[in-house]
Image (tube, helix red, strand yellow):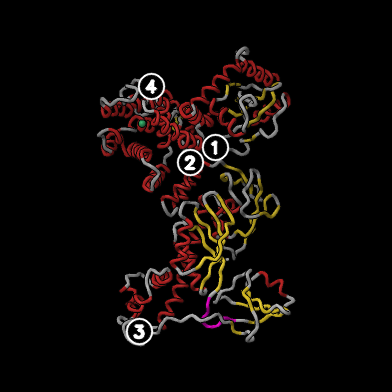
Amino acid sequence: MLRQYELVERVKSYDPDADEAMLNRAYVFSMKAHGTQKRASGDPYYSHPIEVAGILTDLHLDDETIVTAILHDTIEDTVATPEEIEKRFGPSVARLVDGVTKLSRIEAQSESQRAAENLRKFLLAMSGDIRVLLVKLADRLHNMRTLHFIQKPEKRRRIARETMDIYAPLAERIGMYEFMTEMQSLAFRELEPDAFESISKRLEQLHKGDGDLIERIARGLKAHLEANGIEAEVQGREKHPYSIWKKMAERHVSFEQLSDVMAFRAVVDSVDECYRTLGLIHQRWPMVPGRFKDFISTPKRNGYSSLHTTVIHDEQMRIEIQIRTREMHVQAEHGLAAHWSYKEGKKTAARTQHPWISDLIEILEHAGSAEELLEHTRMAMYTDRIFAFTPKGELIQLPKGATPVDFAYAVHTDLGDQTVGAKINGRVMPLRTPLDNGDQVEILVSKAQHPQPAWLSFVVTGKARAKIRRFVKSKEREETVALGRKIFDEIVQRLPNALGWEAMAEALRRLHLPDDDSLMEAIALKRIDDVKVMEALIPGSTGVEGVKPPPQRRAISIKGLTPGVAFHLATCCHPIPGDRIVGLRREGEGIEVHTIGCEQLADGVDADWVDLAWGNETDGGTARLCIVIKNEPGSLAVIAGVMGQNGANIVSMDQTGRDGSFHTFNLDIEVHDVQHLMRILAALRASDVVSTAERI
Ligand code: MN
């Protein structure tokens, strides 16, 4: 364990202005607070926060971060209070410690609504200060280094799995590859002990005989560059068992077929030299097609930049080479932490917000519920990025699987809202097409367009999803209110007297509703029945004579038909009473009734067109719906339940699409009329399992 003076000296070595007294106070405070607590290793507990602080001094982090690391477990595990921390170490450290404590608490919880709520708070707290995350990652790294001391195998596995699933990707997100690699290696050893063992053994065998092979190749590379005037630092290493195992799994190849198990790195002075180095290497050794990547011209989202290539070094052996400048190298090892380090004793902390963090903040502002948030965060954490270009050559970074709609929303909200189509590399393509790296995307827009509910089944970015959902929600409410108003007008017709001009305000007061729209919505969604509305408008009205009975339904009737002429309702557009309709009469075939919007009418130019309208009350028809529902047990039962409660009969049901966690169905249902249909749509949309419901 680092001694007090050693820790202070380390910080002073890269930051002579560091607050020495605060560091000393923190060391003593933590030691006293943790007292006689012990780690699983048998070491005194306080050795853990000190080691965590030590890890962070390697990244040259500022004194506040180091103090936070020393204090990071005091709130959760000792009697120390946030007030005490603030009094002794100031508001800035107190805020950081609070952030780390909150994240530790989330760790202890399951993925429930509450955890997501906490995650939201934590991310907000952290958004201004990435140092909280740095301390948490160092904490996890030290816990992984000491994992083998934990007795229970299940507990070791749980911690290792969590590290693999959450912390290593987080480290990668912010570009801390050193942390990521060590976490993965330690977790892999715990999770796949057999694979780890066998890969390690084979690596050993591979080198039997040629001992310093890596050394020799590195020397050869360096000499080749030197002969051509480039002074490079060349390091070589064997790939980690985990990255070898991952490659074997991803490419379905065996260890023997995996020819590149060695990786080399050339660090040079300038970007210009990077490209010259690449040229020299490709001239000397043939490159492996498809493996060259230029992260200098298009850096990764976490800021990583380098050139990557794989060459055939000699028969049967491929080697991977990374080429970068010294600055890129520091950034690559330490990622975002590099922005917090000190250079020549001067504070150069770049507090610029990381793009990944600002994405989250935007989602936080738009996400409706904590679960929705968690869904977005996971996406933001786990999906890889692709790069696409605007027609002007602007680079847009998106998660893998992103579509032109995601692209449009990433460029600008208005562009997303008005999207009607997209050209990918000059060709018009469907909006659900996943984009590839390097695609040039031109979004076709129309001022009359609105976000479409169907887009929800394929967009992948949190931003697009949140914007579309918000629009769909407001549109659904508009429709629901309009439906409620129609039913309300009918209800008013049935009242014995005309309404006084105060009646509406009185009724809202009696029903405890804030405004007209809320009443209309409640009526449409059947949260309130007709009698209650009538009583609220005119108390006593339903008990007196003169209340008109609800309308009776009669057999289907269509005005405009010559009596006795055979007709049938077209199966392409399924007209139902309330729709505007037209008839097509063909010789010897009777009359086919279509909605006036039906596309099949274009084929009817040779037929006689008959102007038709529905009779007053009718027997209904069949309507076709497209619904997108969550893929979870019981979803279909819920749909069937909604139909039953609303007196609708399902005639047929076809699954038309399936997209991860959503299923799309076409449903034919029997309804009385348009209002009945709208009630059913409203009820479907109100259900938890339904993502969208539309008539088609
Ligand atoms: Mn800890």
- Considering depth in this image, is 536 or 2 the residue closer to the camera? 536
- For label 4, the crowd category at 10 Å Cα-Cα, with few meaning under 14, some 14 to 19 and many 20 or more, is some
**Element at badge 2?**
loop
Q: CA distance from mark 4 to mark 3?
A: 85 Å
- Considering depth in this image, is 510 or 88 the residue closer to the camera? 510
**Element at badge 3?**
loop
Question: Marks 2 and 3: which is nearer the front?
Answer: 3
Q: Position of residue 130 (x, y in %)?
A: 43, 38
- For label 2, the crowd category at 10 Å Cα-Cα, with few meaning under 14, some 14 to 19 and many 20 or more, is few
Query: Of the residues under marks 3 and 1, which one precedes in the sequence?
Result: 1
Q: Is there a contact, CB below 8 Å, between mark 1 and mark 4?
A: no
Q: CA distance from mark 2 to mark 3?
A: 62 Å
Specify the label residue 352 is tagged with.
2
Specify the label residue 303 is tagged with.
1
Q: CA distance from mark 1 to mark 2?
A: 12 Å
- Looking at the rendered structure, the kind of residue marked 3 is Gly
Q: Position of residue 348 (x, y in %)?
A: 46, 34
Write the start and end of the magenta stretch as one range.
613-619
- Looking at the rendered structure, the kind of residue marked 1 is Gly
